[in-house]
Amino acid sequence: MKIWKEFNSSHSSNITIIGKFEDVSNAKGAFKMIEDFTLASWEERYPSVKEFNDYWAINFHPDIPYIGLTDRDIETGIDNYPDITLEGDTIIISSFRTDNFGGIARLMRFSGAKKIVIE
């Protein structure tokens, strides 16, 4: 059974988040972590942001627990499975139907995104 948590009164938004990285290698390195974070609440992967931070501090960067991600960031309230793609030096998250994307933007920036566009 899945219990949906609503954090936004309007789930009709259809947001696209685009993170452009310095190079393909940098984008590839960040992709798995950003994908994992983006899908964490939808797939109920982590009971809290602490578990996410602990896992990725070991597998990506030891400073990840200090970038300020919160439980609200990881519990986005998405009501769909967003499309997440890697196209060269760019990570694109589309069909993201909630306005709670601050954690994703923070994580992209920490991972080396040089430009982040929210459409």
Image (cartoon, helix red, strand yellow):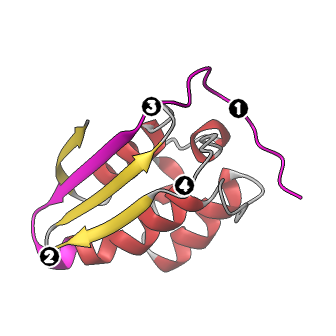
Q: Amino acid at mark 4?
A: Pro
Q: Which mark is residue 65?
A: 4
Cα distance between the residues tagged 1 and 4: 25 Å
**Nearer the viewer's eye, disc 1 or disc 4?**
1
Q: Which residue is mark 2?
A: 24
Q: Which residue is mark 3?
A: 13
Q: Which residue is mark 1?
A: 6
Tell whether 41 sits left or right of 73. Answer: right
Q: Amino acid at mark 3?
A: Ser
Residue 2 among magenta residues: yes
Magenta part, dominant SS: loop
Tell whether 87 sits left or right of 100. Answer: left
Q: Amino acid at mark 1?
A: Glu
- N-term-proximal mark, 3 vs 4: 3
Is the N terminus in the top left, top right, bottom left or bottom right quadrant? bottom right
Cα distance between the residues tagged 3 and 1: 13 Å
What secondary structure is found at the residue carrying circle 2? Answer: helix
Q: What is the magenta range?
A: 1-26
The residue lying at 38 percent from left, 64 percent from top is 84
Residue 52 in the image: above or below residue 41: below
Q: Residues within 10 Å of mark 2 (few under 14, many from 20)?
A: some
Give percent across and percent down for residue 55: 61, 72
